[in-house]
Each structure stands twice: as structure tokens, then as C-alpha cells.
Amino acid sequence: MVVRLCSRGGLLPRLLFSPQKPKIYVPTAGRKAAYGTVTSAKVSVNGVHLHYQQTGEGEHAVLLLPGMLGSGETDFAPQLKSLNKNLFTVVAWDPRGYGHSRPPDRDFPVDFFERDAKDAVDLMKTLKFKKISLLGWSDGGITALFAAAKYPSYINKMVIWGANAYVTEEDERIYQGIRDVSKWSEKARKPLEALYGYDYLAKTCEKWVDGIGQFKHLPDGNICRHLLPLVQCPTLIVHGEKDPLVPRFHADFIHEQVKGSRFRRIHHLCLYVVLRIKPGPHACQVTSYARRQTQPAFTFC
């Protein structure tokens, strides 16, 4: 079983999507995506119109969950293009208030991760998938943890990276450092500014910093640490050693608390290719040396 990180940022997830596991039936009737193409649609879920992209005809349904300020098109274009369309049916969604799932504007009540998890699962049920696997990046990784814990019978397998289960004072200092998008590099800001416009991007980033910061004031800074022992599905946790937003101890904690999970640290180009699929602050500070490296591949037993 292999997880391969290609030079274009594509994560080819064969670690958790082993063909030796039981196959998941994915219905074909009414599907919006033709084989070999990526198509977009909106569907009404929990009172909002959620946008998603879909591709592939495989029996294994996979949901791609974007991170802070993210969308399917900004975070997962390489995966939508490169994941095996014979093996997988791939859906990349835009959470409410992000990407093309607007209106409404994005807000951050204390239960916004739980709300996103319910939206994501209900979206896939609306699309008639019987069971799904999750690839969650950054905030999408946290949402995936909520979904796996809250809906264990519906989640097959899971890969997360750049996620955390609680917020510390160190995290809060890091978040305040990205509050002002005018201080981001142009490379990090430009794709999201093209999607949202500067004003919405700036306003929503400030709201996100306040929203994620509210967990610092809860006991133990809790986001979902209490839910981690409830995760039952096979889980791979990936951490980029040079990630400027998520310190290593967060990945270690999730690995310790999710029973039977596997953990992989990634260095240099590996970090670069994981992070470059998501424009934004995670991707800062990692491009100067990464282009000099060669394409990596990791094999897990």
C-alpha cells in the first residue's frame, strides 16, 4: 500500500484505500460526473446550497475536505485530476461560506467544525453514496475527525494532514500572525483573492482567527480531543516537519489518541507538495529549496 506525493502536489492515497479491503458500492444513476471529467454542481443540504466537484466511476467513494478559506478547486485540483478514476469516485466540496457555497457568508460559531462534518456527511448521503473515505487537509482534517467520530458506520478510511485537536497559546500566536492577509506573500494570497475578492478574503480570515481562537478559552483548548478515541476507521496522520502553522505535537497527540492510526512525518519536498495543493499561509516558507528535490514515494506495510 502506497502513499505517493508527486511533484505537482498530487497525493495518491493507496495506503488506506487498499484493494484488499471490502469494496464500497457507489451508485451510478443520476451521477453528475462523466468518466474522465470533473464536473460541478450544487445541491441543497441543511438549508444551504453546497457546491461540489465530482469525477471518476470507481466503487470507492472519497470526499476531499479543504482547509481554512479553501475550496475544492483551490485545494484539490491535482487530486481531482490524478486520482485513479477506475478505483475511486472523488468528490471535493466547498463548505458553507467557502468557495462557491455562498451565500451564506462564512461564520464561525463554536460548533462550526461539527456543523461542517454534518454538512459533509449529509452532502454525500444526498448524493447517494453508501459509505465514504475522507481526505482532510488543515481545517478539513479536523472536520474529518469529527465526521469519523460522529458517524463511524459511514466512514470507511481516512487520511488527515495539518490538523489539530486543541488550541494552545503558541497556536494562538501563530494564528494572529496570519490575521492580516495583506502581509501574506502574493503567491499565497493571489489564488484565494481571485476566488473571493480581497475584501471577503480579508474579512473572513479575520473571522477565522477569532473563530479558531475561541477554542483556546475552552477547557484544555479543546476542539475535538474528546472525540479522538471514538474514531474507528483506519487512519493515516501526515505531518510536514516545516509546517509553520501546525506544530508537530498536534500530529503526535492525534496519533496517540486515535487507536490503530499510522503516522508519517514528511520533509522538504514532501511538505512542499502536500502544502502547495492549498494556497494560503501553510504554504509559506517552503518553496525555495523544494524545487531542487526529487519526487518521493513512501511505502507502508
Image: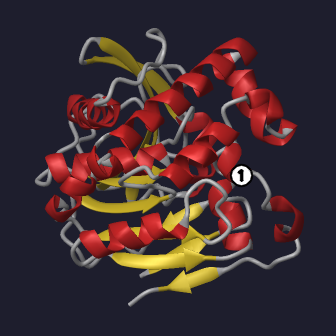
The percent coordinates of residue 127 (x first, y second) are: 26, 32
Most foreground residue, 285 or 134: 285
Left or right of 281? Residue 226 is left
Question: Which quarter shows the C terminus?
Answer: bottom left
Please name the residue that numbered disc 1 is placed on. Answer: 283
Q: Looking at the rendering, which quadrant does residue 215 occupy? A: top left
Residue drawn 41% across and 19% down? Answer: 42
Q: Position of residue 144 (x, y in %)?
A: 33, 49
Tell me which corner region of the image, top left, top right, bottom left or bottom right, holds residue 288. Answer: bottom right
Colour treatment of the image: secondary structure
Residue pushed farthest bottom? 301
Q: Quadrant of residue 181?
A: top right
- View extreme (left): residue: 153
Measured as percent of width and height from the top left, residue 246 is found at 55, 58
With respect to residue 198, does 74 lie above or below? Answer: below
In the picture, measured across the screen, residue 287 lies left or right of residue 118, that is right
Between 97 and 109, the residue placed more toward the observer is 109
Q: Residue at x 54, y 44 (%)?
A: 172
The structure residue drawn at horizontal position 48% and vertical position 12%, both measured from the top left corner, is 105
Q: At label 1, which amino acid type do we have?
A: Ala
